[in-house]
Image (cartoon, coloured by chain):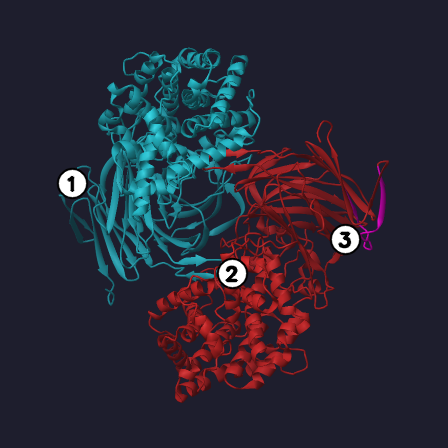
Chain colours: A cyan, B red
Amino acid sequence: MNMQSVLFTENELGPLQAQLGKTSLMGKTISSHAEQVDAFMRLPLEVPGHGEAGGYEHNRHKQNYKYMHLAGNLFLVTKEKKYATFVIELLSLYADKYLTFGFHVQKNTNPTGRLFHQILNEHCWLFFSSLAYSCVAHEMTDAQRNHIVEKLFEPMLDMFTNKYGHDFDRIHNHGIWAVAAVGICGLVLGKREYLEMAVYGQANNGTGGFLAQLSQLLSPAGYYIEGPYYHRYAIHPTCVFAEVLHRFMPEVDIYNYKDGVIGRTVKALLATAYPNGKFPALNDASKSMGVTDAGVQVAVSVLCKHYGCDENIVGMAEIQGEVWVQSCGLALSDEHEKAEQNGAIVTPNFPSIELNEGADGDKGAQAFLRLQGNDSSIAQLNMNYGQHGMGHGHFDTLGITFFNRGQEVLNEYGFARWVNVEPKFGGRYLPENVSYARQTIAHNIVTVDQKSQNNFDVAKADSVHGIPHFFSDDSEACIGVSAFANDHYDDVKMQRSAFLLNDERFEAPLLIDLFRLQSDTEHSYDYSHQYNGQLVRTNFSYTSYDELLPLGENNGYQHLWKLASGSAPQTSLISWLQGHAYYTWLGTSSNTQDEVIFTSVGAADPSFNLRNDSGFTLRSKGGSTLFASVLETHGYFNEEFEQSTDARGQVTDVRVVGHNELGSVVEITSEKAVFTLMISNQENVTKDSQNQLEFGGNTYSWKGFYSLETHPVQGEK
Amino acid sequence: MNMQSVLFTENELGPLQAQLGKTSLMGKTISSHAEQVDAFMRLPLEVPGHGEAGGYEHNRHKQNYKYMHLAGNLFLVTKEKKYATFVIELLSLYADKYLTFGFHVQKNTNPTGRLFHQILNEHCWLFFSSLAYSCVAHEMTDAQRNHIVEKLFEPMLDMFTNKYGHDFDRIHNHGIWAVAAVGICGLVLGKREYLEMAVYGQANNGTGGFLAQLSQLLSPAGYYIEGPYYHRYAIHPTCVFAEVLHRFMPEVDIYNYKDGVIGRTVKALLATAYPNGKFPALNDASKSMGVTDAGVQVAVSVLCKHYGCDENIVGMAEIQGEVWVQSCGLALSDEHEKAEQNGAIVTPNFPSIELNEGADGDKGAQAFLRLQGNDSSIAQLNMNYGQHGMGHGHFDTLGITFFNRGQEVLNEYGFARWVNVEPKFGGRYLPENVSYARQTIAHNIVTVDQKSQNNFDVAKADSVHGIPHFFSDDSEACIGVSAFANDHYDDVKMQRSAFLLNDERFEAPLLIDLFRLQSDTEHSYDYSHQYNGQLVRTNFSYTSYDELLPLGENNGYQHLWKLASGSAPQTSLISWLQGHAYYTWLGTSSNTQDEVIFTSVGAADPSFNLRNDSGFTLRSKGGSTLFASVLETHGYFNEEFEQSTDARGQVTDVRVVGHNELGSVVEITSEKAVFTLMISNQENVTKDSQNQLEFGGNTYSWKGFYSLETHPVQGEK
């Protein structure tokens, strides 16, 4: 029997073998894999029975498929027989036992497998094990092959496409793993009907299968509906399966499908990452997932080989430190080596980008604005005005997060989950994920009448989306984004406009935020910010409570301790220290008699599942209302060296000059200059529109979406 | 005029010049200094007037002396005139202005200077400026010298020795800066009477001056009474002044004074540090101060030159990355270079050590136990059974801290202070330092009747100390320390015995802790632990409160929110996740009806001055009582890679078998073995004592301080 690997041809093995022992990324990756696999192979083979999610058995099955996959590749690349033997023996052991395991008892909404508590994990198992099998099948006896095919792979294929056939065509990240696993296994076994089904769906009518998933889950810009955390999870089978189709189903022309959506979606994923390589936690997400994830490594390798390499891609590989062990990864490794020899490796620098949402790109968008400050640090502002994100969606349309100086400053809570920590509810999503993390109040946003958007109804939320207003990144001084969300609360329309302002007078870009609510009736508006750090000072007095009560009874408020509150002055100043940087926020609204409330997450948390993050809320009552705020980054603190500089910022005031359906005007005063920001609130504004407004007897006029005027204070320049 | 630097001879300059541009530690240090000074010299010269502690003016004066000091050295080493010019011009500007500044208004107990709010800082100013002057004086005109001497240095000397003469002989860390500054300045000005006064005190009778300070502040073991944080602060003038005396007062034979106490105290300081180089926060202290501090750099350089170098010292220099720019530092740099060429640079590995306290070493001690685990990580247990630590002392005799896997696990709160953060009370000690951080309940210890030790009376606390029982570090399996504190509570005597147990069955050393209280009457005992991390699980149910109240009204309890509480089972299990490691604590007492209380720091904190650290307390009521607990380190969690292993530990129970005046016996049960720990409670025990106890009809006998017996569970080995 000939070698029948689905990811390597005989001709491709030579160049990979040539990398053995080299210090190229490919050479280092292979060495690292060999070290890991060798360590695992020193343990006795073990195929355990059922276990809890996140428990020992669960993890062992995951390790088994991971190391079989790596060992399969290593066998082909190194020719060392021990790797093939390991795969063959372990697969045989699985074949001995698989049908003796019953199905797990179902504990959540996902169907269960024979190895795992949910078939998602069983899909992953089949995906990696099929790849491993394809590397070593030619080393097996017929009897070994038949045993594994009949007792393991065929029953799995049957389970996925018959027993759970109703789930196979689901358009979801789980679905991508399902079709990739079934397609690859079918191909490996010479059962091409499974490959066809995986690509075109069971009904072969475009309602299911890989191509339908690519069409429906990815927007034209390549944004993945569930957000970066699930995107990096889905990108792994997406890219591997694409490479398989490229090799075995050339008629699909997968890399050109939908004008190259595979490449676009990899680029889109990379473009969401913070400057430190971590992905923003949009929707249910870990706060620590980043570009070093194995799936992202595969994706960057594919991008390089099939869509052309550039210095950002090479720089990303440098951060990742490894490449995909496959000819795509070799192409990237070679490019990296070349750049290294030329001293041309740079830190990736992704420009600002607006990624549209929806299959046709008409369901709102996600904005990622980046600006480098005078302190040379890159600030990143994310704003969400797209779709809800399906089952993992948060109720935070128009929410923002802000990052600079290497840390998230206005932060997302992320998911309420201790992933894979078995004693914490099996490592699964916790009840607090629903009761807190997904609620509107958990985000940097305005919560209306202390209720979450769309009444926390997923179906309702899935039916609406944000409306882009403008996205402007073609300035070095002031870039901005604005969007509407008019269908998220009954009776209240919302518009948020956020800007990054670079000015020689400030160390770092100012974040300017205008949140406008339109309503004919009075509402309670909670303009909230989540941060981590130590409060340093305020410009108002407040009462700090001797006895703590939750801020409310439901919609996430039940999880917030009300630590302190006070009457807001005309403009409230709240300053805190996070890591080495000071942050000063000044906020105001167009109403009077506002209140500031300081909160801490952790109430109604009987199992200590939540992190105790800090927050504050500017609570305002009114009809149509404009909130305006500025967040200044300043100074430096180093406890170890007992250094502190510029612990007070330069911005002294922010004032709402006026706002109406045509536009909003705010004035920001700093020690050395006054800035007037004028923005259009009209949906049909273009960059050529002429705008004119009158507030307080003064006329404000500008062209386009917005305009910033700077007036130095007398004596300053 | 000849060069008259007090730290360099002409002959020593050549070898330092030879380091310019080299990649040795000395070469790198000089380059780094030049870069910093060049940047500072680009700013206009500025001598500001009065300012707040931690404010702009304060920091500017500090920068001025720091960079003058570095520039003075750089002038001698590089011969670049610009550095001398900078020092001369800035000193002249100070001389122009100094006497025009009145004295600051006094705000705390420290006398005020003309530049700073407390003369401590003015001493530092004189110390570094005198050193700078000594490097450049030969470049000045007579007029320049006279101006600076008459308008600046002489008035300062007069202020320190006359106006504040009553304070000059104070035995305190401030006093070391005072005598070093006055002594060096006097020497530089050719006024040797000041040097004599600095060394022998104003009365020249041994009650004041540098030698008295060395005698009274340092124990024979070299421990500094206020703890490592103030030690590293005091070590700077100590070592510099010692080097000056070595050169200009050979009759003192300073490096052999008190059998080489200078060298011993440097070694003692280094021996307190955690494996990550940070100093444990004993008494008022920052949590982030470490061996990279500039004073510790000077100290390590002095140690190398005058007391002989070894691989630990070279390893420390490697961590520091810089050396003292002086012949001592050159000696260290040369040793480092040699080691580097031989590939002989190792991570410093300090053995366990007991550092006695008191001028005669009879006022208790501080223990630092270290043991490397099977996971290769070094565990460190600190136990305090020495003196109170004067004005910066905490009421925590018998307190412990525990560190492993690169992090403090049972943690000290440290000081309540945001050092140099001007808007936080001028960066000074906060009221919460007294009301919380120094209180007994803030530590890992038993608080009796919810009151702090010695009724929080400093004078009373200064009059008592702990009594060493045994310190045993000569085992690889189980090392331990035990001590008494019989004078810290009326009517209650205390004994704590803490052990690190290494066993093949555990990944990391177990911390075993026996806290015994002896009293004829019933008391309330709060056995408390402070940690940072996420609670993972318990083995008992508890009530988590909907409404938070402080745990008490005073003695630090007013700052603790009572989050949850429950009846303790026979043995309570509390497990948490910190960083990448899981920790499981099992604790019990010899009483029944105990209660477990979960707390969080932050109540009664109107200015958000406190960190919100976590803690738990096992509250027990009884007369003579033994608490016994085990802390197991296990498993691994990595959120980024979604890995979790061994989230549950192996220890399943800890049980008090019995305790009386002769000894205590506890039994620890794990999945694979039962451990019986027997310890002597008799003050006069020696390593040859024969001990025999009977509890529950069983006889327990052993020789020496303690004994550990291991009984594998049936079927295990």
Q: Which residue position holds label 2?
A: B338
In-front residue for pair A464/A138 = A138
As drawn, is A413 to the left or to the right of B261?
left
Q: Which residue position holds label 3?
A: B492
The chain under label 1 reads: A
Residue type, mark 1 in image? Thr
Q: In this rendering, does residue A168 appear at all?
A: yes
As drawn, is B307 to the left or to the right of A118?
right
Judged from the image, the secondary structure of the residue bearing numbered disc 2 is: helix
The chain under label 2 reads: B
In-front residue for pair B414/A455 = B414
Q: Based on the picture, tell me whether residue B688 belongs to the magenta stretch.
A: yes
Q: Which quadrant of the figure has residue A715?
A: bottom left
Judged from the image, the secondary structure of the residue bearing numbered disc 1 is: loop
Residue type, mark 3 in image? Val
Q: Is residue A17 above or below residue B311?
A: above
| Whole-percent x, y for residue B147 in the image | 42, 86
As drawn, is B515 to the left or to the right of B660?
left
Query: Dot 1, crowdedness within 10 Å: few (<14), some or many (≥20)?
Result: some
Instruction: Give me the C-alpha separation between circle 2 and circle 1.
Output: 69 Å
Asked whether the residues under marks 2 and 1 belong to the same chain, the reply is no
Magenta region: B677-695
Q: In this rendering, does residue A400 appear at all?
A: no
Disc 2 to disc 1: CB gap under 8 Å = no
| Whole-percent x, y for residue A147 in the image | 48, 12
